[in-house]
Image (cartoon, grey):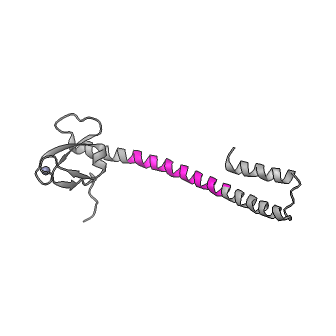
Amino acid sequence: MDLNAKAAYIRGLMTGMEFDPASKNGKVIAAMMDLLEEMAATVTEHDDALDQVYDELEILDEDMDDLVSDLYDVDFDEDEPEEEGIYEVTCPNCGEVATVDEETLLNKELVCPNCGAAFDIELEADEEPEGK
Ligand SMILES: [Zn+2]
């Protein structure tokens, strides 16, 4: 039973027990009932919205993975067969080629194991924007 159904159930109990909303106690309980229904509706609404956000986030995550492998498969697997999710990057400071996994890659900032320089990875698209 979801929250809205539970609130409706309590509302039904109130109606069924000859509840007097004009009495002293009744006023409080009626006000609480109103609040309960409103809260149940709001929480349910937020829950649904959150579900939707998670779904969209998952899709974005998959798109991101596709994008990263598209970009780096083209540039980095000339010499040797790559393991899945492993990429080679060239240090702009010393020119040493380092191997990184996808997770490190997505953190964007790398430290060269050879010279210790920190550098950002630039995700460059294959296509140059048109127009001169
Ligand atoms: Zn280096």
Q: At which x and y percent is residue 17?
A: 87, 51
The part of the image, by quadrant, that contains residue 102 is top left
Residue at the spot x=63%, y=53% of the render?
A: 44
Residue name at image x 30 percent, y 51 percent: 107
Q: Is residue 25 left or right of residue 63?
A: right
Q: Is residue 49 magenta?
A: yes
**Farthest right residue?**
18
Instruction: Identify the residue shown where x is 21% and y is 39%.
Output: 77
Q: Main secondary structure of the magenta part?
A: helix
Q: Give the image location of residue 128, x and y in percent.
A: 26, 57
Q: Nearer the viewer, residue 49 or 29?
A: 29
Foreground residue among 115 and 92: 115
- In the displayed structure, would residue 84 be above or below residue 115? above
Q: Is residue 129 magenta?
A: no
Magenta residues span 40-63
Residue 99 image-quadrant placement: top left
Q: Position of residue 33 (x, y in %)?
A: 75, 58
Seen as rendered, the residue at the extreme front is 25
Where residue 81 sits: x, y (%)?
21, 33
